[in-house]
Every structure is written in C-alpha cells, then in structure tokens.
Image: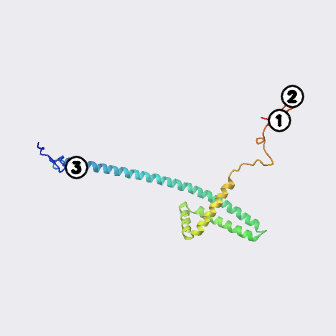
C-alpha cells in the first residue's frame, strides 16, 4: 500500500504529515502561543501591581499605628520626665546628690521625649540602627533594660485578684447562713 503524496514514513515507522503543508498550522499555533504568553504576562504584571499596592497599603497602616504609639509613648514619657523633675526639686532640700541623679534621669527622659516628638518612625528606626551599629554592647544592654522595665510595668499594672486573707471582706465574699429552728431539739445554722 502506498502513502498519499503529503505523508511520509519516519524512521520509527509511523506515518507523519509532510512538513511542507503544515506551515499555516504551525504559524497558527505559534501565534496562539505568543498571544497566550502575552496574556499571561499581562495578568502576572497586574497581579504583581495589585500585590504591591496591598503591601504598600499595609505598610502605611503599620506606619500610622506605629506613629500613634510613638506619640502616645512621647506623651507618657513627657509625664514621667515632669514627675522626675518635681521629685528632683523636692530632693534638693534633703539630698543634693540624689536630686542631681534624679535630675540627670529627668533630663535624659526629656531629651528622649523631644526625639520621639520631633522625628518620624522611620527616622527613629534609623537612629536606633545607627546606635546599634556604633555601640552594639550598649544597644543590647539598653534593649535588655527596656525589656525588663516593660515587663515590670506590665506586671505592676495588671489586675491582681484579692486574697482571702484580707481583714475586710464584702458581703458577696461571705457565705450566706440561715438560722433554721428545729423545734424542741434545738436549732442550728444551715448553709443556703
């Protein structure tokens, strides 16, 4: 049996179409493949842009929250600094040495408050990174000290349950008893 003119037999013994007649089919496949590749690239670029926009939005929200916390910290630290200045003023009459040290701490707290108020979150992070590079041992010590102080602050401000050994107790803490009279056999207290 002989094959038609546009078919040929390959080395493997299978009959293949002649390559001379498949040019329009190959060109169509190449065009479709190129179009598909372009569409995939466009969709990938659009997804990348959308992801970048969402990451930027989240970063801005995080910066906003960090800025609010920075402002709150600056306000609280300013209050601590003012309180330390008052304590230093009161200590000056009794102990000038103690007053001097308290005033030094108050001045440091005041400078830190000013730094927090006057700089953005990014600037503060840059300052901390520079300090960490220049003074790594001091940076680690300060971080440990701040961590300890924060944990003490949190544990001191936590709500603690009252102990049962207190001298005064409320009526809600006392068990309720009723006097139940048992007639001629006598009465007793019964818990209700």
The quadrant holding residue 138 is: bottom right
| Residue 35, numbered circle | none
Count of numbered tags: 3
Q: The C terminus appears in which quarter of the rendering?
A: top right
Q: Is residue 91 left or right of residue 123?
A: right
Q: Earlier in the sequence, mark 1 or mark 3?
A: 3
Q: Which mark is residue 189?
A: 1
Q: Quick one: label 2 or label 3, which is nearer the N terminus?
A: 3
- 138 relative position to 10: left or right: right
Instruction: Indicate which disc, 2 or 1, sits on the residue closer to the N terminus.
Output: 2
Nearer to us: label 2 or label 3: 2
The quadrant holding residue 185 is: top right
Residue 27, numbered label: 3
Task: Answer above or below: position of 114 versus 45.
Answer: below
The answer to whether the residue labelled 2 contacts the one labelled 3, judged by CB atoms less than 8 Å apart, is no
Left-right relation of 164 to 17: right
Residue 128, given in percent of the width and then of the height, sits at 56, 65
Per the image, label 2 sits on a secondary structure element best described as helix
Q: Considering the numbered disc 1 on the image, is that residue within a helix, a strand or a loop? A: strand
Residue 77 in the image: above or below residue 54: below
Identify the residue at horizontal 65%, vertical 64% (top origin): 109
Label annotation for residue 183: 2
Q: Taking the image as drawn, is residue 154 in sight? A: yes
């Amino acid at each position: 049996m002989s094959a038609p003119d546009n078919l040929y037999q390959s080395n493997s013994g299978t009959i293949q179409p002649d390559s001379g007649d498949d040019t329009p089919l190959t060109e169509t496949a190449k065009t479709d493949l190129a179009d598909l590749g372009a569409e995939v690239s466009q969709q990938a670029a659009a997804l990348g842009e959308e992801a970048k926009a969402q990451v930027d939005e989240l970063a801005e929200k995080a910066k906003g929250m960090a800025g609010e916390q920075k402002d709150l910290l600056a306000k609280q630290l300013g209050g601590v600094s003012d309180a330390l200045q008052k304590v230093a003023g009161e200590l000056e009459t009794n102990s000038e040495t103690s007053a001097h040290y308290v005033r030094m701490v108050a001045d440091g707290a005041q400078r830190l408050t000013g730094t927090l108020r006057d700089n953005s979150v990014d600037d503060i992070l840059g300052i901390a990174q520079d300090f960490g590079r220049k003074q790594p041992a001091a940076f680690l010590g300060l971080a440990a000290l701040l961590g300890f102080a924060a944990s003490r602050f949190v544990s001191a401000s936590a709500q603690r349950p009252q102990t049962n050994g207190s001298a005064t107790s409320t009526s809600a803490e006392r068990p309720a008893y009723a006097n139940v009279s048992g007639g001629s056999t006598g009465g007793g207290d019964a818990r209700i």
